[in-house]
Amino acid sequence: MNMLSPSVTELICTRISHDLIGNIGAVSNAVELLEEGDMDFLDDIRSILKTSSQVLAARLKFFRMAFGAVNANIEDKNLVVKTTEDYLKTIGNQNFPIILEAGSFSAAFAKAFMLSAMILADMVIKGGKIMIYEESGRLCAKLSASSRIAGQKAAAVADILAGSGEERSAQYAPAFYLRSLMPAAPVQINLADEENFSFVIG
């Protein structure tokens, strides 16, 4: 079993906390409004609680599968794809959605599939399409953005996946974790232009 270094574990914990705290705060604020008993805000409170609870549920399920211990859920390809799609909906919006196009992949690549989607989604500014599939025993992950991607993030991820990343920021926790899962696997990076990024690992 490949044990994570303390620094990568810290990055993962910080990233998960960061991605949950906003909606937890929204739920807390909604509860405070309920306790004050002002019914003028009831519709707003319902909307806040519904949206925030859905986001929290989707993200927690995704984080548990992507970063947690291996369990039966990670062996279910359909569940992996659905959970990843639900996660992507929490970071996109109706005007600029992030679409997932999942090809065939084996259970051995399930965690890498989810982490790859998270890595590529972090680069999106105004929507796009993520394609992930297994080919010849390697995992291929591609982002085709609707507008330019976040170039600094793309460059940092490329360095991390290549094994030379020095940027120890929690936003790159998925890349560090993916690299730790496949420490000996060769990685091919392609940053073709401002709208496309892809990598092949394995």
Image (tube, rainbow, N blue to C red):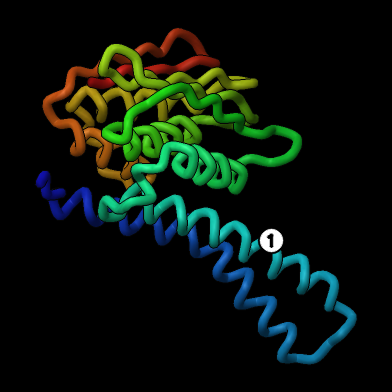
For the point 76% across and 73% down, the residue is 45
Q: Is residue 113 left or right of residue 193?
A: left
Asked if residue 4 is positioned above or below residue 35 in the image, the reply reads: above
Q: Is residue 156 visible?
A: no
Asked if residue 160 is positioned above or below residue 3 in the image, the reply reads: above
Instruction: Give the image location of residue 10, x and y in percent.
Output: 24, 56
Instruction: Give the image location of residue 199, x and y in percent.
Output: 35, 18
Which image quadrant for residue 57? bottom right
Q: Mark 1, residues whose alpha carbon is within 10 Å: few (<14), some, or many (≥20)?
A: some
Q: Is residue 124 visible?
A: yes
Asked if residue 89 is positioned above or below residue 162 in the image, the reply reads: below
Q: How many marks?
A: 1
For the point 30% across and 53% down, the residue is 71
Asked if residue 46 is positioned above or below residue 202 in the image, the reply reads: below
Q: Nearer the viewer, residue 70 or 200?
A: 70
Which image quadrant for residue 105? top left
Looking at the picture, which amino acid does disc 1 mark?
A: Thr
Q: Which residue is mark 1?
A: 51
Instruction: Give the image location of residue 136, x and y in percent.
Output: 28, 12
Q: Nearer the viewer, residue 114 or 29?
A: 114
Q: Quadrant of the C terminus?
A: top left
Which image quadrant for residue 182? top left
Q: Is residue 47 left or right of residue 197?
A: right
